[in-house]
Amino acid sequence: MNTGDAEDILQDAFMDAFTSLDRIKNTEAFAGWLKRIVINKSINFIQRHKKSWLELETADLEHVEEAETFDELEFSVKIEAINRALNAVDEKYRAVINLHIFEQMSFEDIAALMEIPSATARSRYLRGKQKVLTIIGDKI
């Protein structure tokens, strides 16, 4: 599933909810009712596409070589080092890094969200990234 699929599922769920508003008797239960619709739509999507995903996974496994495997413990240690480094930097840098890397927001969107100039968002990202790399050093 990708972002587009998730957006389609959410849109379908909202359309179903909107067209079925007359069926809800207790308006206080609206959030739970909508959540159930989204969950059901998601489950239906997964069931419909499960076969094609399994075929892709099987095809991918045929091409995996032993050289592509990696050490889970080493990977976990690196992730932990990055998390510690991120937590060690100032919140203003950490927020921009998280929004840009993990939420994939543009610097313009980050600037609007944080109510700062986009140049400030960029510089906070670059300074924060440099601080994280300095903290990590030789740990990864």
Image (cartoon, rainbow, N blue to C red):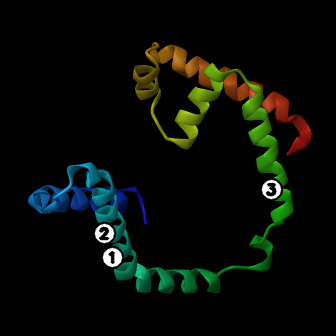
- Give the residue drawn at x 53%, y 35%: 100
Q: Position of residue 106 (x, y in %)?
A: 45, 32
Mark linked to residue 76: 3
Above or below, 69 relative to 129: below
- Give the residue drawn at x 81%, y 49%: 78
Crowd band around label 3 with a 10 angstrom C-alpha radius: few (<14), some (14–19), many (20+): few
Quadrant into which the C terminus falls: top right
Residue denoted by label 2:
41
Q: Between marks 3 and 2, how big is the CA–CA gap?
A: 34 Å
Q: Position of residue 128 (x, y in %)?
A: 68, 24
Front in this rendered view, residue 106 or 102: 102
Q: Position of residue 63 (x, y in %)?
A: 64, 82
Check whether the beta carbons of the residues at disc 2 and disc 1 lie within 8 A of each other: yes
Residue denoted by label 1:
44
Above or below, 45 relative to 36: below
Mark 1 / mark 3, whichever is N-terminal? 1
Q: Is residue 12 left or right of residue 51?
A: left
Mark linked to residue 134: none
- The label nearer to you, 3 versus 2, is 2
Q: Position of residue 2 (x, y in %)?
A: 42, 61
Crowd band around label 1 with a 10 angstrom C-alpha radius: few (<14), some (14–19), many (20+): few
SS at circle 1:
helix
- The label nearer to you, 1 versus 3, is 1
Above or below, 121 relative to 69: above
Mark 3 / mark 2, whichever is N-terminal? 2
Amino acid type assigned to the residue bearing label 3 in the image = Ser
Front in this rendered view, residue 60 or 43: 43
Q: Is residue 24 left or right of residue 103?
A: left
Amino acid type assigned to the residue bearing label 1 in the image = Asn
